[in-house]
Image: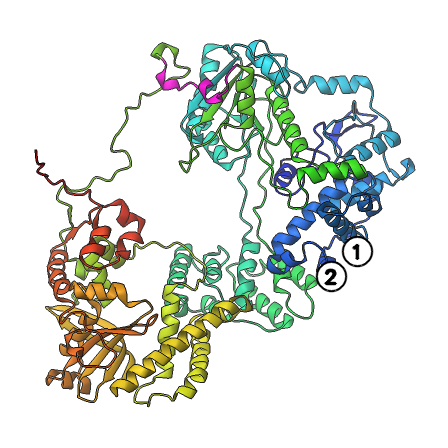
Amino acid sequence: MSHFDILSRHHFAIANGFVDFMRLTPLQTAAPVTGAVRPVTTGLLRDTYLVPVEVFDLAPIDEQRDAPWSQSLAVARDETVFAVTRALDAVARATQTLLPSELQPERLPEGRARRHLSALRDLWSDLGGSLPEDLQVCRNVIGSDAADALEPLPLLASIDCPYANSSEDALARVLRHHHGTAPDAITRSWQALHPPLSGIAQGALGHVQSNLTGRAAPVVADASLQVFGLRDPMEEAEFAAALVQRWLDAGEIDTAAEAGLLLPDDPAYGLALTEAFDRVGLLLSGAPAVAAERDSVSELIAALLPVLQGPAPRTALATVALSPLMPWSAATGRAIAREVIARGYSRLWRSLDGPAAALAEALRPVTSVAALFARLGEIDRLLAVPGRLGARIALLRAQSGEEPGWQKLQALVAPRPLQGAAPARTIEGVSVFAEPDLPWRSVRRLVVLGMNGRGWPRPQPANPFFTETEIELIHAATGLQLSSRARVNARRLELFRRQLCAATEAAVLLAPARDMAGTELPPTTGFALIGRLLGCKDPTELAIDPRRLPAEQYPVGLTARLPDHAAGQPVLPENGVVKLDRDLLALKAEAGGDPPAQSPTQLETLIISPLAWLLGEVDANDRTWKPELLDVRVLGTLLHGVIERVFPPDAKVPEAAELSRMTEAALGEVIARKAGWLAEPIWAAERASLVREALRMVRAWARFLSDNGAVTLGNELSLSGDHAGLMIAGRADSLLQLPDGRYMVIDHKRSSAAKRRSRMELGWDLQVALYRVMLERSNAHTALAEATASGATIVTAYHTTLDGAVLADGAGRGLARVECPADDPAREALKHLQAVVSEVRNGCVTLNRAGDAKRFGKERGITAYALEGDELVGALLMPEEQTDEVQDD
């Protein structure tokens, strides 16, 4: 279809997000000999007038340094190019010649409108007047002679349309001048096959059909126009299917084709309607036969480009792993993707062999165009079906320059849904009309869905170039009629009115209260206008809940649904304990083997929420994909890496003059190893801030080490030990030895000391106490283990890097720059750990209560992240226990 034919669903979608095609009456041509009618399309005009192909490339936009959008272009290139292209397209359509010389911004007063219009004309001129394909064909036809046409194209009926823009009007006039009009008999015959442009129904429906976009006195609602309020699109579909079946059973219509469905342009309705009408055995005519398909080739190349550009984003690597083109099963792809998202790499991927291993090895950054296409070709040969990427690789190679233009290449392969099969329209079957389309035949009874929501008419996006006032000013000063919101809304409302005219007897409007996500839906503008014509200021007053009607007045057979006060609520044990009758610590144990060791982090989760701990044990945590972010976890990893490199084992504390150089070098190294994406130019401000933070941290830690004469024995030291029969394994961030023979286990935390201090004072700190356990009851035979077994004193402490504080247990008293909030900061936590370990060994999981997060903060000094970070844990919270309160008289 061309841009002149508003019947095209594809172009209506573009109209909502890109440009507005205003013509409501599509141009049709009748063959002089056979009388066959066909729409005027871009392809038909190109072939008839032998229009040459031109390339439309917006590259000159980068050369316009003084354009109003130049700064936006530097910040958000893709979005700005999209907006400029949209504005240029709209301005071109408002001209009669489709030439930049027709624009006359000089007639406008100085101001924003003149600057924008001048910049668009300059850009269009720099493009050599080139246009997208459909407009370029239109311009060639407008400038052609009748003798240039290879065949006659006589037009049907009148070509006048009050909603057409200037280029559409100009094209229609030229075609009529070149080819004339078809015989009146053909026009009348064609019109007789299609719904009328004005209403012919009786009663309230006829009143709405005739006056929806005008002013008329209200009438009383009657049986010709009914409105029912339903729950959501799924229930709308079921209701519509039952309603059509009832009409057939009652003889109110003779065939299914005499019933019609008018659908919003919302994918929620397509599948729901197909399922609902299949259940009642009714065929749909005009419904999409196949849903939009995935463009697997473009998806894969779009994911490969950022991987080969490097550093590889986790989401891109996971997308590659999940591609159906990969040489492994879908289950293997999902497992690889989970590991990549969680850790940034996949052990499973590395363990594969053959093409899978070779493909993993091929996902390395390239530095030249030749290397890029060689690597893409190598990957193509390793796919499950080799050669699938060949055509798209050839396109990229043709568009590339001497250096990889990553953004341009990415735009060329941006994946888009592949359009499914065109709707099959048959004589039999319930007629389906879509929101973008004029109805293709009349029906006796019409069901309109989605009267609440974003349709009828669908709102248009804001114009970033011209305000409504500026559009009026441009029209008054230059004669250029740009599409304003008022014109577009008027056209869309007129389309809705014509769609209602497809019904010759009656219509039923369905108004869903909520969408499929449960969001409440407001009435559409069309619904409000219908309400006004029926004497209701609030259109929702028209909607009848069919379940509230007496049984004898049910429009369809309804199953009574009693309210379920527990709907959506889980069934929880009264005592809050779930019994699973097995040792939950041994879930990951191999047959006949010992349970695997627990880490301090896992045990901290266990004392907060046994359910959250259990979900982690069975690998049932939330797997939501997220891009690389400079969050608390990444920041902690980077700062730990800096301390590890600036203060290596058995080395002297660096001199103050060396700290700055060493810190910056260490940070660069750890970024390259742990967060390569942070080295990109876009993260420059964050890197500079991180350098400052790291230097403050390093200077404070150097002072602590120097003041206490401490020697670093190790960083990221692996420890393991036994606590009451429970094996524990973890890594200590730093292990120090003090001059008096004491050992100090340090956990570096990127935080301030306040919350940690409170937790230690209350006796609910656990992590470093477990490091003490692993040293005192170590199952490794090392010099350190022997020293601690001989009675060496161990100090456990936290270093909070944001304020440089060091918080230790009672064994750290007397050390410089050390605060000891409690002698035993883990006394309560270790008691609770012993109790909860006993529970899970016996297969019992105690659920948290609704007030635990607040209570833990107040009574334990613990921020209960385990309760906040998982929706399943939050959904299975027990209600608060009821307490009897004694009231004084």
**What residue is drawn where x is 61% and y is 72%?**
371
* Left/right of residue 387 with respect to residue 608 in the rendered view: right
Say whether residue 783 is visible. yes
Q: Crowdedness of circle 2 by 10 Å Cα count: few (<14), some, many (20+)?
A: few
Q: Are marks 2 and 1 in contact (CB under 8 Å)?
A: yes
Percent position (x, y) of residue 805?
Answer: 28, 73
* Left/right of residue 118 with respect to residue 796 in the rendered view: right
* Tally of numbered discs: 2
Task: Tell me where the magenta segment starts and ends, as one range.
Answer: 535-549
Q: Please tell me in which quadrant of the rendered image residue 275 appears.
A: top left
- Amino acid type of disc 2? Glu
Secondary structure found at label 1:
helix
Q: Nearer the viewer, residue 438 or 855?
A: 855
Percent position (x, y) of residue 435?
Answer: 58, 30
Magenta span includes 682: no
Say whether residue 609 is visible. no
CA gap between label 2 and label 1 equals: 9 Å
Q: Please tell me in which quadrant of the rendered image residue 835 appears.
A: bottom left
- Residue position for label 1: 126
- Residue position for label 2: 63
Q: Nearer the viewer, residue 173 or 580?
A: 173
**In the depicted structure, whether residue 790 falls above or below residue 400:** below
**What residue is drawn where x is 26% and y is 88%?**
709
Q: Which mark is residue 503?
A: none
Percent position (x, y) of residue 705?
Answer: 29, 84
